Image (tube, helix red, strand yellow):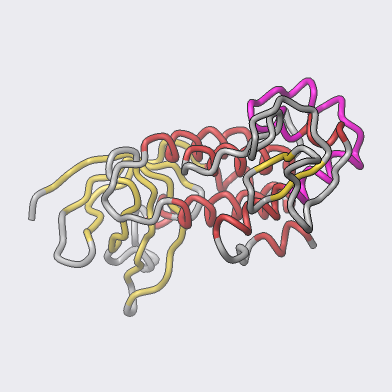
Amino acid sequence: MPLYRDEAVVLRTHKLGEADRIITLLTRQHGRVRAVAKGVRRTTSRWGSRLEPFTHVDLQLADGRSLDVITQAETLDPFHARLGLDYDRYTAGTVMLETAERLVTEEKEPAVQQFLLLVGGLRAMSGAEHPAKQVLDSYLLRSLSVAGYAPSFDHCVQCGVEGPHRFFNPSAGGVMCSADKLPGSATPAQETVRVLGALLVGDWPVVHAADPRHLREASTLVSAYLAWHLERGLRSMAYVER
């Protein structure tokens, strides 16, 4: 079987047989890949811990008919070791992994931007520079943008008139002016809309200076925007919201 090498983040694992696992990966050059790690559940396995969710790894894989086979694994960054010590960061991180898997739908199709965004997001999540919820919200907005669902927070999505605007509608794709607003649109505070724009572009001084109630409102709108474009909610989001 021909071999290839790539960087990857482990998104998910599940058992296969008595000793193997199927590993779902987001790779740098090959997009989403599902591969078998043989013997990885045995206590004598030398690299089972390298294939846990959140781990950034350098892999060698063999092309397979239905599933590829992992033949080598070297850890580049064990994000799980740091995230596992903080419940808020761990649960927010699981949302990032599930989002990446849902947005990169085609197997073996390059998704370099999504890969780099996920690695950067996990690095920020495992650090202590920014609050976990705001790192997650920023990642979700950016990953949706890369997938083609970029929200507008400064211009009306219908007519293009520059804001600020009072209305926000996930199905329309962002803020709307009073003339174009759709029924059921939310009416967030202007400070909340400013926070959303800052989260999208990574303007952290604005995010850090925001009032907690505007951060909470922004998180609610990000969750609604994500759920609309994924067409169904994420299982992992329930743990963050709880």
| Residue 158 falls in image quadrant | top right
- The quadrant the N terminus occupies is bottom left
Extreme-bottom residue of the structure: 17
Residue under the point 78% across and 58% down: 184
Residue 168 place in picture, x, y as percent: 75, 45
Q: Which residues, given as a range, are shown in magenta?
A: 196-221
Residue for point 28% across, 45% down: 30
- Residue 16, percent from left and from top: 34, 75
Camera-side residue: 16 or 177?
Answer: 177
Question: Is 172 one of the magenta-colored residues?
Answer: no
Q: Is residue 70 left or right of residue 155?
A: left
Residue at the spot 41% in from the left edge and 51% down from the top edge: 104
Q: Quadrant of the C terminus?
A: bottom right
* Residue 215 is covered by the magenta coloring: yes
Q: In the picture shown, does residue 207 fall above or below 99? A: above
Residue at x-position 73% and y-position 38%:
134
* Residue 183 drawn at (x, y percent): 77, 57
